[in-house]
Image (tube, helix red, strand yellow):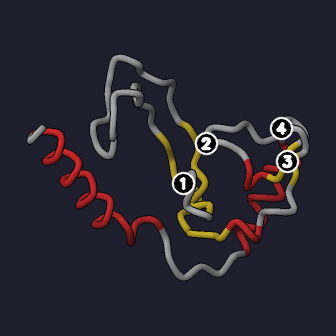
Amino acid sequence: MNGSGRFVGVCKMNSEVDENVIFEFWAMDDVWKGLFQVEWIFIKDIPNKFFKDIKLSNNGFKSVTNSRDTQEIPRLEGEMMLKIFEDFKFQTCILQHFQYYDERQSLFENTKNNS
């Protein structure tokens, strides 16, 4: 999650983006359009410090921790990241935080509806 200080998982995109569908959950404004299917490979929180030494050749050799959401990762760097995900012994994962995000979404919707 961008801005979280951690990577939260790895998934495989299993469909093309259907831009005629809007995924309404957690969308704080109208910039998120489209829907696609994914298959989760790893779901675990891993702090950025475990990835900071991986530099992206296609992003000015900046650390992968300094990349944007949806940044393409070259194969070698991707394999290095996958190895970290495979070996990391985690204690938390994003699924444990869903209640917080659901409550945040409800608060946003209530505020938006009362404006």
Q: Are marks 1 and 4 in contact (CB under 8 Å)?
A: no
Crowd around label 2: few <14 · some 14–19 · many ≥20 (10 Å) = few
Q: CA distance from mark 1 to mark 4?
A: 19 Å
**Secondary structure at numbered mark 1:** loop
Tell me what residue is drawn at x 88 percent, y 48 percent: 76
How many other residues sit within 10 Å of disc 4, few (<14), some (14-19) or many (≥20)?
some
* Mark closer to the observer (2, 3): 3
Give the structural element (helix, strand or loop) at label 3.
strand
| The quarter of the displayed image where residue 114 is located | top left
Q: Is residue 12 above or below residue 65?
A: above
* Residue that carries the numbered disc 1 in the rendered image: 1
Determine contact: label 3, label 4, CB under 8 Å: yes
Mark 2 or mark 3, which has the lower sequence index? 3
For residue 31, above or below residue 103: above
Q: Residue at x 25, y 51 (%)?
A: 105
Nearer the observer, 39 or 33: 33
Q: Quadrant of the N terminus?
A: bottom right
- Residue 33 pos. (x, y %): 39, 26
The type of residue carrying mark 4 is Asn
Q: Name the residue beneath numbered marker 3.
A: 62
